[in-house]
Amino acid sequence: MAVIYERVALIGLGLIAGSMSLAMREAGLADEVIGHARSPETRAAAREIGLVDGVAETAAEAVEGADLVVLAVPVGAMGAVAAEIAPHLKPGATVTDVGSVKQAVIEAVAPHMPPGVHFVPGHPLAGTEHSGPHSGFAALFRNRWWLLTPVEGSDPAAVERLSVLIRAMGANVERMDAAHHDLVLAVTSHTPHLIAYTMVGVADHLKRVTESEVIKYSAAGFRDFTRIAASDPTMWRDVFLQNKEAVLDILGRFTEELFVLQRAIRMGDGAHLHDYFTRTRAIRRGIIEAGQDTAAPDFGRSLTAGEVAKP
Ligand SMILES: NC(=O)c1ccc[n+]([C@@H]2O[C@H](COP(=O)([O-])OP(=O)(O)OC[C@H]3O[C@@H](n4cnc5c(N)ncnc54)[C@H](O)[C@@H]3O)[C@@H](O)[C@H]2O)c1
Ligand SMILES: O=C(O)C(=O)C[C@]1(C(=O)O)C=C[C@@H](O)C=C1
């Protein structure tokens, strides 16, 4: 495939940046991929496994001469990284991010962008519970959504060029308003993660009763919760703090529904429970019929083309 950006700089060398580097290099989408991560251990690991073509000691050094800069750090760190790289960005370069929250990232990054640099915020809807330089794999984005939330005045040509790169990595691009993105993701990703963290926390608090039984007898449902609850603590701390309003809104609705179900159980209202579960089952079936079931594969390993979801 043709080169889309000559030089790409990845700031942060974890799951998402690592997967991007592998996908870009596998398909020949960039002449050179340079990476930087804050910790010396991560930089050493990236060098050792050849994750990128070159590892820079500083973010400023990484972005020198880059045509595309990708901010792939926890959302709470985006603003500081943007401030650090701003004076070193090449005129005409595109800066994108892969953060799971969009409004807060735009507010933190956009003010630092020099005139002539194109900022195109984005979010790949693909991930696993793994993190760090060893966790990436080239197929991560295949047949998944990648949302772009261009800001006012975003250069259409820059948005289109980035979209071409994303499609070449196998993902499907959709544009969305940042506030809408944050509400949708609060429902589909952020609050479910909080519920999983809580459920595993509840089991942990019951250790006295359960001891090793939590592990020994953990059925599929609880296992799914533990996978999600194994996700990176720094990343998720930042997601909840940076998408506070939308998450609190959805959490409020969740709690109200939970109380209704709690009451139905207490009152022995089987009809209510049956109706409710019938509706939720239809939603799950709708997702599968639309080809969007991503629950089945074991994300701890690379996916084959047949296993990945189709948006
Ligand atoms: N993990 C997912 O499922 C997923 C999916 C889509 C988007 N995202 C988003 O992508 C971003 C990266 O997530 P990830 O899963 O790749 O995380 P990760 O923990 O695997 O990697 C993060 C990297 O950023 C580096 N880092 C942290 N703070 C830094 C700083 N101040 N300066 C430079 N480097 C720094 C870390 O050393 C690490 O290399 C986050 O914003 C996250 O919200 C994650
Ligand atoms: O599959 C997982 O492990 C994920 O949590 C991936 C997931 C998600 O919630 O779907 C997590 C956060 C992202 O911002 C995008 C994708």
Image (cartoon, helix red, strand yellow):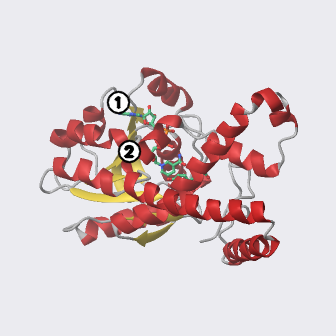
Q: Nearer the viewer, residue 262 or 91?
A: 262
| Element type at mark 2 | helix
**Label 1 residue near ligand 1, CB within 8 Å:** no
Q: Residue at x 68, y 39 (%)?
A: 202
Q: Which mark is residue 254?
A: none
Neighbourhood count class around disc 2 (C-alpha, 10 Å): few under 14, some 14–19, many 20 upward: many
Mark 2 is on which residue type? Val
Q: Where does label 2 land, which residue?
A: 75
Position of the C terminus by quadrant: bottom right
Q: Residue at x 72, y 49 (%)?
A: 224
Neighbourhood count class around disc 1 (C-alpha, 10 Å): few under 14, some 14–19, many 20 upward: some
Residue 63 seen by the camera: yes
Task: From the viewer's perspective, tell me whether residue 235 is left or right of residue 82.
Answer: right
Q: Where does label 1 land, which residue?
A: 56
Mark 1 is on which residue type? Ala
Which residue is outermost to the left? 115
Height in image: 20 above or below 154? above
Task: From the viewer's perspective, tell me whether residue 51 is left or right of residue 63.
Answer: right
Task: Select label 1 or label 2 by which is in front.
Answer: 2
Q: Nearer the viewer, residue 285 or 45?
A: 285
Height in image: 69 above or below 207? below
Task: From the viewer's perspective, tell me whether residue 99 is left or right of residue 227.
Answer: left
Tell me whether circle 1 and circle 2 mark residues in contact (CB < 8 Å).
no
